Image (cartoon, grey):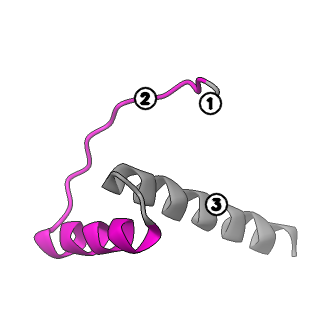
């Protein structure tokens, strides 16, 4: 596994969002909710990039 440059950040979310992030992590088989946040951000950036091209 390659070493990637990482930054540690803290996110403040509502209890409902934290619960849903935990559910998404369990469904996707991720170990942490941070991985869910990474995936959601990547997907959103790709979606925005597609609409920008059009």
Instruction: Describe the element under mark 2 as helix, strand or loop.
Output: loop
Q: Answer few, some or many: residues within 10 Å of disc 3's Cα (few below 14, many 20 plus, some between 14 and 19).
A: few
Residue sitting nearer the eye, 42 or 32? 32
Residue 9 as seen in the image, left or right of residue 39: left
Residue 15 as seen in the image, left or right of residue 42: left
The image shows residue 31 at horizontal and vertical percentages of: 35, 52
Of all residues, the one furthest to the left in this rendering is: 15
Between disc 2 and disc 1, the foreground one is 1
- Residue beneath label 1, please? 1
Residue at 59% over, 27% down: 4
Q: Marks 3 and 2: in contact by CB < 8 Å?
A: no
Name which quarter of the figure residue 29 lies in.
Answer: bottom left
For marks 2 and 3, the one nearer the N-term is 2
21 in magenta: yes
- Residue beneath label 3, please? 45
Instruction: Describe the element under mark 1 as helix, strand or loop.
Output: loop
C-alpha distance separating marks 2 and 3: 18 Å
- Residue beneath label 2, please? 7
Residue sitting nearer the eye, 16 or 35? 35
Residue at 41% over, 58% down: 30
Where does the magenta region start and end? 3-28
């Amino acid at each position: 596994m390659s070493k990637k440059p990482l930054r540690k950040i803290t996110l403040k979310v509502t209890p409902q969002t934290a619960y849903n992030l935990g559910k998404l992590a369990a469904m996707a088989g991720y170990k942490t909710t941070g991985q869910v946040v990474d995936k959601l951000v990547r997907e959103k950036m790709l979606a925005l990039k597609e609409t920008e091209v059009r």
